[in-house]
Image (tube, rainbow, N blue to C red):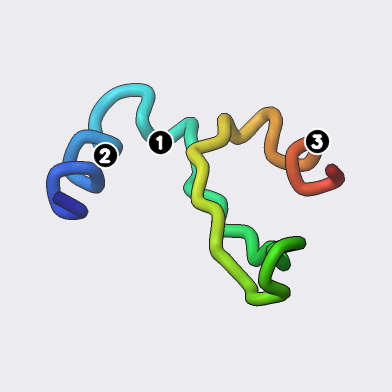
C-alpha cells in the first residue's frame, strides 16, 4: 500500500502535500499514539501551530 501512495504523490500536484505524523498522548490510557495526516504545504505552519 505505501508504495502506491508514494507513487501517486510523485505525479502532478501530489508534491504540494506533506505527510505529517504527530505524537499525541491519549487521555484515556496515558499511552502515546501517532496521528498521520496529509497536509497541503501552504497550510503546514498553521497545522503544526495547533
User: What residue is rendered at 48% in x and 31% in y?
Assistant: 16
Residue behind mark 1: 15
Q: Nearer the viewer, mark 3 or mark 1?
A: 3
User: What residue is rendered at 15% in x and 53% in y?
Assistant: 3
Name above or below for residue 20 compared with residue 25. Answer: above
Give the spatial CA distance, label 2 vs label 1.
6 Å
Q: Which mark is residue 10?
A: 2
Residue behind mark 3: 46
Dividing the picture into quarters, in which one does residue 22 lie?
Answer: bottom right
Q: Earlier in the sequence, mark 3 or mark 1?
A: 1
User: What residue is rendered at 24% in x and 47% in y?
Assistant: 6
Tell me residue 50's x, y (percent).
Answer: 84, 43
Tell me residue 42's x, y (percent).
Answer: 67, 29
Name above or below for residue 8 compared with residue 26. Answer: above
Mark 1 is surrounded, within 10 Å at the Cα level, by few (under 14), some (14 to 19) or many (20 or more) other residues, namely: few
Q: Is residue 5 left or right of residue 30?
A: left
Amino acid at each position: 500500500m505505501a508504495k502506491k501512495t508514494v507513487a501517486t504523490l510523485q505525479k502532478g500536484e501530489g508534491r504540494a502535500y506533506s505527510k505529517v505524523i504527530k505524537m499525541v498522548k491519549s487521555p484515556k490510557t496515558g499511552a502515546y499514539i501517532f496521528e498521520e495526516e496529509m497536509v497541503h504545504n501552504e497550510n503546514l505552519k498553521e497545522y503544526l501551530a495547533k
